[in-house]
Amino acid sequence: MTVAEPAPAPAAAPVPPLATRARAVGGSPVRDILAVTARPEVINFAGGLPAPELFDRAGIASAFQEVLAHGPAQALQYSTTEGEPVLRAALAARVTARGLPTTPDDLIVTTGSQQALSLLATALLEPGDTVLVEDPCYLAALQVFGLADARVVAVPGDADGVDPAALEETVRRERPKLLYLVPTFQNPTGRTMPAPRREAIVAVAARAGLWIVEDDPYGELRYDGEPVPWLAALPGAEDRTVLLGSLSKVMAPGLRLGWLRAPAELRRACAVAKQAADLHTPTLNQLAAARYLDVLDTHVERVRSVYGARRDAMLAGLPGALPAGSRWSRPEGGMFLWARLPEPYDTVALLPRVVEENVAYVPGAPFYAGAPDPGTFRLCFVTQTPQEIAEGLRRLGRGLARGLTS
């Protein structure tokens, strides 16, 4: 008896390619730098990470324990897409106390404010739509708009942010759908847009029929100066401004809790997009955060005190670390400081030499939607102690000197 040879396996066809948007939009250069510089001996000014030693571990643990002790069935169950009513009510009260009357129904709780950006892109943007941004701009927002197949156009500005006259001209030329701004303690520059500039920006948007997306993850981290009203709180902004907020920088980023405040029609569209994305933000995290908000202000005061001292330490050390002719921002709050080295310094080319000194920054180039300034870079000052900051700046100075002479 002969055994038949097995039939040859049919040739496998290649799998279809990734979507064009997935192939066109790269990963975060910040994440790439953090992966390279994860060694414990590296003083890392590159990340945008809150200081982990300041997390209120006991207070947050107590909030979770109380939720699980008194309402486990609710905490472990599915929830509504818009968010737990108790958290929305608490967030609405905080927003109202900061000068923008808000009801719980005005808000959607999101899985971090980054998700809010993605929901807005889904609800607002068609492929090819134009989005206006600051230059430089928050890097992950550029990723979101790229994945939405939007055209991203930078609006010229100055130390106070987007220039209103340049915005009006750009709107006339480009016919954009939305303007994305981080007007308070901006990432990456740390700058804050003054109140008169905000009023002028809102007036341009009102005349042009333009959505404004106002991202405010850092607004509660003010160390000096006077608070400036949200764009969303200004006359003429009511029907066209989306305000994004986050608990990541003031509570803990691992909880992934943010929120958006938007006019009703857009808010409903975002809720539908969120249903398709994740149904809802984790119930347990929402309920624990709602309990913790009762003591959040006390925690934020402690964080402000520590971060303010760290900002001051970085500002004190920069003159001795950077070459003559360098310039840098003096942020009134937030987490970041922006610096520019004189020609012929190129911060992308210099980064490997700097990392050899066991210190890291983020080159400015990835933050630009337009032509980058090669001499710019971002420093995060909140994660290290003043002593570590001083040592990191000494290493930075050595690395910059070596890089220019090599």
Image (cartoon, rainbow, N blue to C red):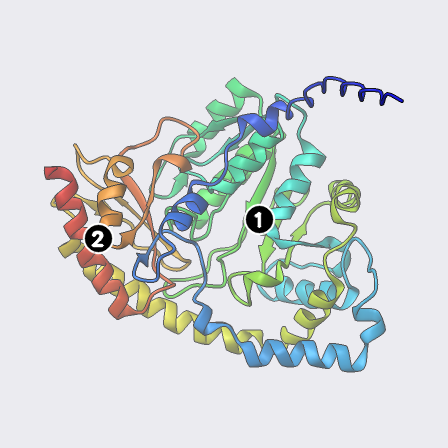
Relative to 215, residue 335 above or below: below
User: Is residue 192 rendered to the left or right of residue 317?
Assistant: right
Q: Position of residue 107 (x, y in %)?
A: 72, 55
Q: Which residue is mark 2?
A: 357
Asked if one can make out residue 151 in the rendered structure from this viewpoint, the answer is: no
Which of the pair 299/267 is nearer the observer? 299
Q: Which residue is mark 1?
A: 234
User: Is residue 63 rendered to the left or right of residue 280?
Assistant: left
Dot 2 amino acid type: Glu
Q: Position of residue 14 (x, y in %)?
A: 68, 20
Q: Quadrant of residue 376?
A: top left
Q: Position of residue 144 (x, y in %)?
A: 58, 37
Q: Secondary structure at mark 1?
A: loop
Which of the pair 372/294 is nearer the observer? 372
Residue appearing at x 61%, y 49% in the figure: 243
User: Is residue 43 rendered to the left or right of residue 243?
Assistant: left
Relative to 72, residue 346 above or below: above
Total number of numbered labels? 2
Residue 95: mark: none
Residue appearing at x 62%, y 28% in the figure: 177
Q: Earlier in the sequence, mark 1 or mark 2?
A: 1
Asked if one can make out residue 255 in the rendered structure from this viewpoint, the answer is: yes
User: Is residue 319 rendered to the left or right of residue 13?
Assistant: left
Q: Position of residue 311 (x, y in %)?
A: 31, 63
Q: CA distance from mark 1 to mark 2?
A: 47 Å
Dot 1 amino acid type: Leu
Q: Quadrant of residue 238?
A: top right
Q: Quadrant of residue 284?
A: bottom right
